[in-house]
Image (cartoon, rainbow, N blue to C red):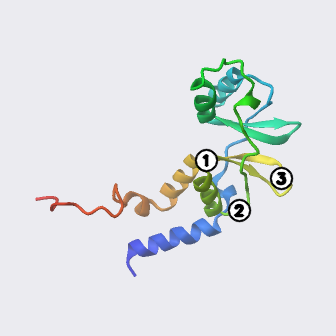
């Protein structure tokens, strides 16, 4: 078996086995639904994060991301005092800390998400999983697989490269 094939098999196996908690999701930063978009932007900048979880009485009711602000507020020329509830994504897809990394990746891919709220067994918020964390995991654990991929998989050069 080639080293490349073995590396891909290891990657597939580990993505099924390793849990989301192994990625050390970032702490969940929250905002109330009645706060302004300006407050949300300030909080995202303060914590250097791309999203906030929208909570009411410690219950997750939505997520607001940089992309939500761009598409639902700035692109529509809404004022910055618009309430977060008006631009958030309600009832966000979540992942449990014990679920596999593969499950998280599948949910992100299916929904086109860059962030997933992470819940514990009691369905309490424990963090946010970002696509950035997954990429770091892949690069750290499987550098040969990641770094040896062609820029366009399946592409064949038209002419011979090199001397």
In this figure, which residue is indicated by the disc labeled 3? 123
Point out which mark residue 33 bears: none
Q: Position of residue 14 (x, y in %)?
A: 58, 68
Q: Earlier in the sequence, mark 3 or mark 2?
A: 2
- Marks 1 and 2: CB-CB under 8 Å? no
Q: How many marks?
A: 3
Q: Earlier in the sequence, mark 1 or mark 2?
A: 2
Location of residue 5 with respect to 163 vertically, above or below: below
Label 1 crowd (10 A; few <14 / some 14-19 / many >=20): some
Figure quadrant of residue 103:
bottom right
- Give the quarter of the figure containing the C terminus: bottom left
Residue at (80%, 41%) from the top-left corner?
Answer: 61
Distance Cα–Cα, label 3 vs label 2: 13 Å
Between circles 1 and 2, the one closer to the viewer is 1
- Can residue 49 be seen? no
In this figure, which residue is indicated by the disc labeled 1? 113
Location of residue 126 with respect to 8 vertically, above or below: above
- Give the quarter of the figure containing the N terminus: bottom left
Residue found at the far front of this picture: 76
Figure quadrant of residue 78:
top right
Residue found at the far bottom of this picture: 1
Mark 3: which secondary structure? loop
Q: Position of residue 97 (x, y in %)?
A: 73, 56
In this figure, which residue is indicated by the disc labeled 2? 99
Q: Position of residue 124 (x, y in %)?
A: 83, 49
Q: Is residue 29 rendered to the left or right of residue 123?
A: left
Mark 2: which secondary structure? loop
Residue at (62%, 68%) from the top-left corner?
Answer: 16
């Amino acid at each position: 078996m080639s080293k490349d094939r073995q590396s891909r098999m290891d990657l597939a196996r580990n993505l099924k086995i390793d849990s989301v908690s192994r990625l050390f999701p970032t702490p969940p930063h929250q905002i109330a639904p009645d706060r302004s978009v300006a407050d949300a932007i300030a909080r995202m900048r303060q914590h250097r994060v791309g999203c906030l979880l929208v909570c009411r009485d410690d219950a997750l009711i939505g997520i607001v991301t940089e992309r939500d602000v761009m598409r639902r507020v700035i692109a529509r020329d809404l004022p910055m005092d618009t309430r977060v509830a008006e631009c958030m994504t309600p009832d966000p897809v979540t992942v449990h800390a014990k679920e596999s990394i593969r499950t998280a990746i599948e949910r992100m891919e299916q929904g086109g998400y860059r962030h997933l709220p992470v819940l514990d067994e009691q369905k309490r918020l424990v963090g946010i999983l970002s696509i950035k964390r997954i990429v770091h995991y892949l690069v750290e654990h499987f550098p040969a697989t990641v770094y040896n991929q062609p820029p366009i998989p399946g592409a064949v050069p038209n002419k011979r490269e090199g001397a």
